[in-house]
Amino acid sequence: MSDELVVGISDMKIARAPQELISYALGSCVGICIIDKVKKVAGMVHVMLPSSSIGDNVNAFKYADTGIPEMVKQMEALGCLRAHMTAKIAGGAKMFEIKSTSTIGNIGERNVLATKEVLSKLNIKITSQDVGANYGRTITFNSSSGDLKIKSFAKDVKII
Amino acid sequence: MIYNELNETHIDVLKEIGNIGAGNAATSLSQMLSKTIEMNVPEVDILNLDDAIDTMGGHENIVVGVLVSFYGDIDGVILFLLKKEFVHLILNSLMGTELNSFEEISEMEMSALSEIGNIMVSSYVNSIASLTEMAIDITVPSVCIDMTGAIIDAVASEFSEVSDKVMFIKEKYFCGEETIYSNMLLLPSVTSLKILLNKFGMEI
């Protein structure tokens, strides 16, 4: 009955209703879920870093600035229209508080900022979000309803 | 990326560096818990993130993470991951409490875990420092209880400049009739990795 597609770290999948997309245990990573409710097609990408300029650039889905446009492109190739697309985002937590001279701890926040910037450039509206704070999230995106279910340790399940 | 440029000899040196601290860390643990702890030769592997997460029981397995960053002649972070049995052993030995579930853990118990992590990481770092004749300091540890996947991805993201791989040091401790695994991730920065290898007469 349950038809789930698992999206790994630095990975992207596209589902058709009534399939669900799931990504486990997002920490500072951000899960970006985009749906075309008319076409009933949904995509989820699990990005680790904000910008491909700081990395080795082998895998587009590792970065917000390359992963999100690539997913949108592939959804459009399946007949989705940009005008029908809306987004929900989750993740970008700060798992550890570290007081030091290094930059540790702000990567989650930078991922969220980059994600919002990319989505705004693509003219895709964020309808809801659950980002930041200091805990991990497992997210499940329903491609029929567009509901995003968020499960965390020692917390109630949330649907946004 | 940089781990891909390493050859077998480089990896052996890194494994040796991983090994050096393990004995000292076990001794510190034994003293703190007032228990005899025996250990095997540690396993040191360079793993990709998914394999590291699997070793810890999968993405959603709840663990305690103690993160310490080190700085000085070299810098980077060490992440100490404790599964439930290990946490129970520590809390039971130190405070006489039973750990039924991670949800019930108290502030006091969290700070005990932080202190254990701190002492083990210190003895680790100190032995690397004295062997290589470098000055290395560590920060106050930060602790969290959460899903393995979330903890590892957050730490790896900060250091993805190095690669999608992490150095995973797994030690098997025997304490009375119990067998406990201690798991540590060592993530030096790119520059520090080069400095470390140079100290052992190697270039990358």
Image (tube, grey):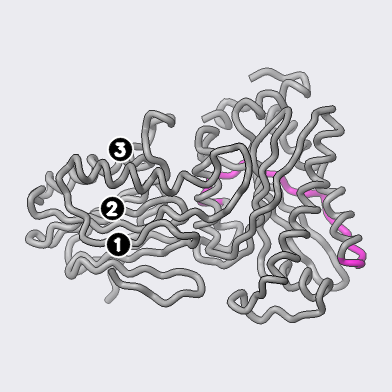
Q: Is residue A96 above or below residue B109?
A: above
> Horizontal and vertical percent for residue A3?
28, 69
Cα separation between marks 1 and 3:
21 Å
> Horizontal and vertical percent for residue A114?
33, 42
Determine the chain carrying the residue at label 3: A
| Image position of B46 (left or right of B178) | left
Quarter of the image that includes the C terminus of chain A:
bottom left
> Residue shown at 32%/69% (left/top)?
A149
How crowded pointer 1 is (Cα within 10 Å; few <14, some 14-19, many 20+) is rated as: many
Amino acid at dot 1: Leu
How crowded pointer 2 is (Cα within 10 Å; few <14, some 14-19, many 20+) is rated as: some
To which residue does mark 3 refer?
A: A65
Amino acid at dot 3: Asp
To which residue does mark 2 refer?
A: A13
Amino acid at dot 2: Lys
Cα separation between marks 1 and 2:
8 Å
> Residue shown at 58%/32% (left/top)?
B3
Q: Would residue B42 be counted in the magenta stretch?
A: yes
| Image position of A145 (left or right of B124) | left
Counting residues from the N terminus, which is met first, the one under dot 3 or under dot 2? 2
- SS type, badge 2: strand
Quarter of the image that includes the N terminus of chain A:
bottom left
Q: Which residues are magenta?
A: B33-51
> Horizontal and vertical percent for residue B201?
77, 19
Q: Which mark lies nearer to you, 1 or 3? A: 3
Same chain? Circles 1 and 2: yes
How crowded pointer 3 is (Cα within 10 Å; few <14, some 14-19, many 20+) is rated as: many
- Quarter where residue A60 is shown: top left
Q: Are marks 1 and 2 in contact (CB under 8 Å)?
A: yes
To which residue does mark 1 refer?
A: A21
